[in-house]
Image (spheres, rainbow, N blue to C red):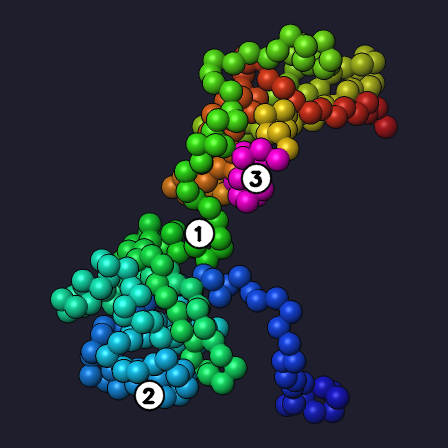
């Protein structure tokens, strides 16, 4: 069909929504200024087009203009704005139009082209780095909050030493040439390599060693739950957002030079051939 009609494209219709996209919970955009002439007229036009029964007056709503072009313009109830944003809108502060905001969609009926949303956070000036980073984290549901006291309570206090029973049940690699390939500035050294000559110039034992974080992150604890939510550490140019508390990821679970640390290891005996 495509070859015979190159200008045609398949069409279809949505018959059901199996699972709502989490992206509707993470909208980044800019607000219009309340009461501006042409914007107020546009908002009232949108309200009629939206067919939301709860909408009464264009004076009560602002437009939200999402950065993502896949999203349509949205309506935000002035009364649901954060207090700091309300004050700026009422005072006629024009700079609010240049602030990035984080919002969520509340309602998007089948009969409407225009969703209703509410603003969660005012992130900051759109052209600045930190607000842009905050927007990226929000859009991708990356948790940048501090670790909860319950999670931190799961991590042993420093200084910490490997318990004697672990020396009795684990293989000791401390006398083997072991090294990491991380940059000199790295402090969370979670993996390392080792090499050992087994048969002179013929067979070598190669080891891969991963810091044993599972020793500290016990199942069904607060730390285990929080680590599952975070899923991974996120590295951005300015800083790192860790999956595990720094005391664990940078100390107890980091294969630091000259420090006894627990690891999960796999070795291979490899010949020249």
Q: Is residue 193 visible?
A: no
Q: Position of residue 11 (x, y in %)?
A: 65, 86
Mark nearer the N terminus (1 vs 2): 2
Q: Which mark is residue 137?
A: 1
Q: Residues within 10 Å of mark 1 (few under 14, many from 20)?
A: some
Circle 3 SS class = helix
Q: Which residues are magenta?
A: 220-233
Q: Quadrant of the C terminus?
A: top right
Instruction: Name the residue: 51% across, 20% down.
Output: 156
Residue in front for this viewpoint, 64 or 8 = 64
Q: Are marks 3 and 1 in contact (CB under 8 Å)?
A: no
Mark nearer the N terminus (3 vs 1): 1
Q: Is residue 242 visible?
A: yes
Q: Which mark is residue 41?
A: none
Q: Are marks 3 and 2 in contact (CB under 8 Å)?
A: no
Q: Closer to the camera: disc 3 or disc 1?
A: 3
Please indicate whether residue 40 sits to the left or right of residue 251 in the image.
left
Please say whether residue 227 is one of the residues in the magenta stretch. yes
Query: What residue is pinned by disc 3?
Result: 225
Q: Which mark is residue 45?
A: 2
Task: Give the main secondary structure, helix, strand or loop, of the magenta stretch.
Answer: helix
Q: Closer to the camera: disc 1 or disc 2?
A: 2
Circle 2 SS class = helix
Circle 1 SS class = helix
Q: How much space separates mark 1 and mark 2, taking CA atoms?
A: 33 Å
Q: Position of residue 100 (x, y in %)?
A: 32, 61
Instruction: Name the residue: 35% across, 75% down.
Output: 75
Q: How much space separates mark 3 and mark 2, taking CA atoms?
A: 47 Å
Mark nearer the N terminus (3 vs 2): 2
Q: Closer to the camera: disc 3 or disc 2?
A: 3
How many marks do you count on the picture?
3
């Amino acid at each position: 069909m495509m070859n015979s009609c190159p200008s045609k494209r398949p069409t279809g219709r949505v018959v059901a929504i199996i699972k709502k996209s989490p992206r509707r919970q993470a909208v980044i955009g800019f607000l219009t200024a309340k009461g501006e002439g042409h914007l107020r007229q546009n908002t009232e036009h949108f309200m009629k087009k939206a067919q939301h029964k709860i909408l009464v007056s264009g004076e009560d709503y602002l437009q939200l203009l999402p950065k993502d072009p896949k999203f349509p313009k949205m309506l935000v109830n002035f009364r649901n704005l954060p207090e700091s944003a309300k004050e700026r809108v009422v005072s006629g502060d024009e700079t609010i139009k240049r602030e990035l905001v984080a919002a969520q969609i509340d309602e998007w009926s089948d009969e409407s082209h225009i969703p209703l949303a509410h603003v969660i956070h005012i992130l900051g000036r759109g052209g600045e780095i930190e607000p842009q980073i905050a927007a990226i984290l929000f859009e991708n549901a990356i948790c940048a909050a501090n670790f909860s006291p319950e999670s931190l309570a799961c991590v042993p206090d420093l200084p910490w030493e490997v318990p004697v029973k672990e020396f009795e049940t684990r293989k000791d690699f401390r006398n083997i040439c072991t090294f990491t390939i991380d940059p000199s500035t790295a402090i969370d050294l979670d993996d390392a390599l080792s090499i050992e000559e087994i048969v002179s110039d013929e067979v070598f034992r190669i080891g891969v060693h991963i810091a044993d974080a599972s020793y500290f992150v016990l199942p069904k604890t607060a730390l285990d739950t929080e680590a599952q939510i975070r899923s991974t550490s996120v590295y951005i140019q300015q800083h790192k957002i860790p999956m595990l508390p720094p005391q664990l990821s940078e100390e107890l679970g980091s294969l630091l030079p000259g420090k006894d640390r627990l690891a999960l290891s796999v070795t291979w005996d490899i010949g020249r051939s």
